[in-house]
Image (spheres, rainbow, N blue to C red):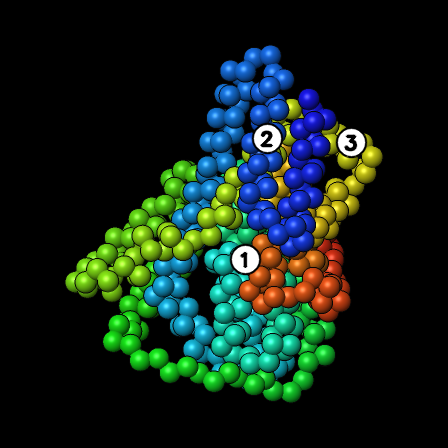
Amino acid sequence: MNLIIILIFIIGYILIAAEHFNKINKAAIALFTGVLCWTVYIHYAIDKEVVSEELIKNLGEISGVLFFLLGAMTIVELVDAHDGFDIITNRIIETDKRKLLWIIGFITFFLSALLDNLTTTIVVISLLRKLIRDSKDRLFFTGIVIIAANAGGAWSPIGDITTTMLWIGGQITVVNIITKLILPSLLCILIPLIILSLRLNGKIERPQKEVKISSNALPYTQKAVVFFSSVLILILVPVFKSVTHLPPFMGMLIGLALLWIMTEIIHGKKDEENKHNLSIVFALRKIDTPSILFFLGILLSVDALQTIGALTDLSSWMTENIHNENIIVISIGMISSIFDNVPLVAATQGMYSLSQYPADHYFWEFLAYCAGTGGSVLIIGSAAGIAAMGVEKINFFWYLKNISLLALIGYLSGAFMYILQHQIFGL
């Protein structure tokens, strides 16, 4: 039985990694893999009621991650519907390639920490389309956006799904993850920025602006209110968890409810036609539902492996044969450039218990950095890379030739910084 479930998981994994070749949405494969793993498990189980109870228990933990994502993605879509991101984009007037590269890199880095790397990548690429006309120039900027988005998401509990998973799972806490990973994550993007700056020169050519005349244009005040309220709510989610001791998804949901009420009041006097596109209901229809279903399928698959004891066996093998936490974690980060980092982190959470590595242990914090940033090495290794690949039509081998080495150098530099600051300063 165990071998069959493991084979199903491996085959599903390979098909997910090859999504851009087989043209099958990874959410469909993940869901099929997750359900099939549990179907095989219950088929061979002697006590089927126990298996059902285990599934329900695991689903309760998974739902916390899914509802958190649902709330965060809806809030971001609401901001976008109100053109709230224009508050940032309209202030960028730089045309020098090198200076603009640094501006975009740092905007992406810090915005990703507040939102998430997937959303930030989509938003900033949309910004680049308004700033840079030449598609070849835009590709290099997009490469930096992927690296910066993943690096920025790694040191924030809400910036990357894997960091969020570790936070929700109790492996890390908010203050520690920020203080321990801010420097390694910053170095991860600084090194590629410096190297790429030496290769770029000249001015960028901006595309011609489209003149739009609309009687329904939102006033700046409404854009600002929705934008800053949304950012404040996202920032306060960790505070809500600390004060109430409720799971993070509860803070995200109450924040979503507050925004829902606020926007209903703001647009209360408008007719239904003008109000509809500015509502939470419309934002809910626009969110990336396949991504949520993908996480559901993957987490179900990993929980099946954890329940049958496969992850514990893998943990024992790695511990007995590698004997070095740094090599183990760095290897996980490198593997995440080939396979999605979500199942890798979920698997690691299943392999190592909190009794073995307590909350805020060196291992968990280093894992948050490596899993969050290692996916930048290949464009298929992170949600940010996949999104950029779809939006900008980046060729896999172009990224491998022009960006992968930069991402690898940045990744290893940040990893070295984390190890160094721990050994020298005890951080």
Q: Earlier in the sequence, mark 3 or mark 1?
A: 1
| Residue 118 vs residue 31, the one in the foreground | 31
The residue under label 2 is 36
Q: How many numbered discs, if any?
A: 3
Q: Which mark is residue 285?
A: none
In which quarter of the view is residue 86 placed? bottom left
Side (left or right) of 54 relative to 385: left
Crowding near the residue tagged with mark 1, few <14, some 14–19, many ≥20 C-alpha atoms within 10 Å: many
Kindly indicate whether the residue at mark 1 contacts the one at mark 2 (C-beta within 8 angstroms): no
Q: Secondary structure at mark 3?
A: helix
Q: Amino acid at mark 1?
A: Asn
Crowding near the residue tagged with mark 3, few <14, some 14–19, many ≥20 C-alpha atoms within 10 Å: few
Q: Which mark is residue 117?
A: 1
Q: Amino acid at mark 2?
A: Leu
The residue under label 3 is 317
Camera-nearest label, 2 or 3: 2
Quadrant occupied by the N terminus: top right
